[in-house]
Image (cartoon, grey):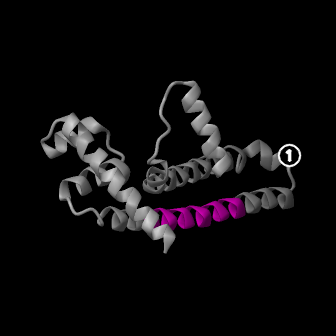
């Protein structure tokens, strides 16, 4: 992890950008987004598997050319794979729910309710600055300032949590 941070710092330096000092707290906050992405990818794999079963499972020509045992074996194998994906999906959904709870509890450590709202909308609900500003009746700049004030507070909380 430290080598990765050094590489990223070197890239930022080469591009003339400052390294993101709030990367650890953002990584923690983005756990929800990452968990949602994993759920979505598994759902896509299930869709592909179901399409494959439909495309290969029961056509008349396959019944003619395959013996009953081969056909049954293909269907059984596909069903087992689909069942495993369904279990994986349930585990990913549980992990996503756990990530939401952990991140929401972490955000709740902020004293300012406007900061809590901005950070929740950004990291749990995945909203962009414009949508957050519209929802809160504020300018985009004000929303970004609230976010900017929240990150150091959350970074400090994360560092304290990691130290204990």
* Of residues 50 and 42, the one drawn nearer to the viewer in this rendering: 42
Q: Residue at x 72, y 57 (%)?
A: 78
Q: Which residue is mark 1?
A: 65
Say above or below: 12 vs 126. Answer: above
Against 94, residue 43 (above or below) is above
Q: Which of the 4 quarters of the picture holds residue 158?
A: bottom left
Secondary structure at badge 1 equals: helix
Residue at image x 32%, y 39%?
128
> What's the magenta region?
79-98
- Is residue 81 covered in magenta? yes
Residue depicted at 56% across the width and 30% down the height:
13
Q: Position of residue 87 (x, y in %)?
A: 60, 67
SS assignment for the magenta stretch, majority? helix
> How far across and how far down the image is residue 119, in percent?
31, 52
Which of the 4 image quadrants contains residue 68? bottom right
* Res 135 → quadrant: top left
């Amino acid at each position: 992890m430290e080598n990765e941070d050094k590489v990223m710092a070197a890239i930022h330096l080469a591009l003339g950008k400052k390294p993101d000092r709030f990367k650890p707290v953002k990584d923690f906050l983005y756990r929800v987004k990452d968990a949602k992405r994993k759920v979505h990818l598994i759902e896509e794999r299930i869709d592909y598997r179901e399409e494959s079963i439909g495309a290969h499972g029961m056509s008349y020509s396959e019944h003619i050319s395959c013996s009953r045992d081969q056909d049954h074996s293909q269907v059984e194998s596909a069903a087992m794979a689909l069942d495993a994906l369904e279990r994986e999906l349930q585990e990913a959904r549980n992990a996503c729910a756990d990530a939401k709870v952990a991140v929401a509890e972490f955000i709740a450590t902020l004293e300012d309710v406007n900061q809590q709202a901005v950070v929740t909308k950004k990291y749990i609900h995945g909203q962009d600055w414009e949508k957050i500003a519209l929802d809160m009746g504020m300018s985009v700049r004000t929303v970004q300032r609230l976010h900017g004030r929240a990150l150091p507070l959350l970074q400090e909380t994360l560092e304290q949590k990691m130290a204990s």
